[in-house]
Image: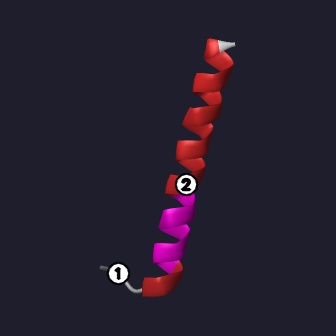
Amino acid sequence: MILLTSVNEYLVLIGLTVAMLGLARLAYGDQPC
């Protein structure tokens, strides 16, 4: 059970990170830096 919960939290953190990167990419566009 503990392993499952930790994995779920890890996946949630990864999802949030990907979402943040996606929003940042949309906000700044495809321009470098």
* 10 Å crowding of disc 2: few (<14), some (14-19), many (20+): few
Q: Quadrant of the N terminus?
A: top right
Q: Residue at left 58%, top 34%?
A: 9
Magenta-drawn stretch contains 19: yes
What percent of the width, then of the height, locates residue 7? Answer: 61, 27
Q: Quadrant of residue 16?
A: bottom right
Task: Name the residue carrying label 2.
Answer: 16
Magenta-drawn stretch contains 23: yes
Q: Residue at left 40%, top 86%?
A: 31
Which residue extends farthest left? Answer: 33
Give residue 20's mark: none
In-image side of 33 versus 21 (left or right): left
Q: As displayed, is residue 17 above or below residue 5?
A: below
Q: Amino acid at mark 2?
A: Leu
Q: Amino acid at mark 1?
A: Pro
What percent of the width, then of the height, locates residue 14? Answer: 54, 46
Residue range of the region highlighted in magenta in the rendering: 18-25
What percent of the width, then of the height, locates residue 23? Answer: 53, 74
Q: Residue at left 48%, top 85%?
A: 27
In-image side of 15 versus 28 (left or right): right
Q: Is residue 3 visible?
A: yes
Q: Which of pointers 1 and 2 indicates the residue nearer the eye? A: 2
* 10 Å crowding of disc 1: few (<14), some (14-19), many (20+): few
Q: As displayed, is residue 7 above or below residue 15?
A: above
Q: Residue at left 55%, top 57%?
A: 18
Q: As displayed, is residue 28 above or below residue 5?
A: below
Task: Name the residue carrying label 1.
Answer: 32
What percent of the width, then of the height, locates residue 25? Answer: 48, 76
Q: Is residue 29 visible?
A: no
Of helix, strand and loop, which one carries label 2? helix
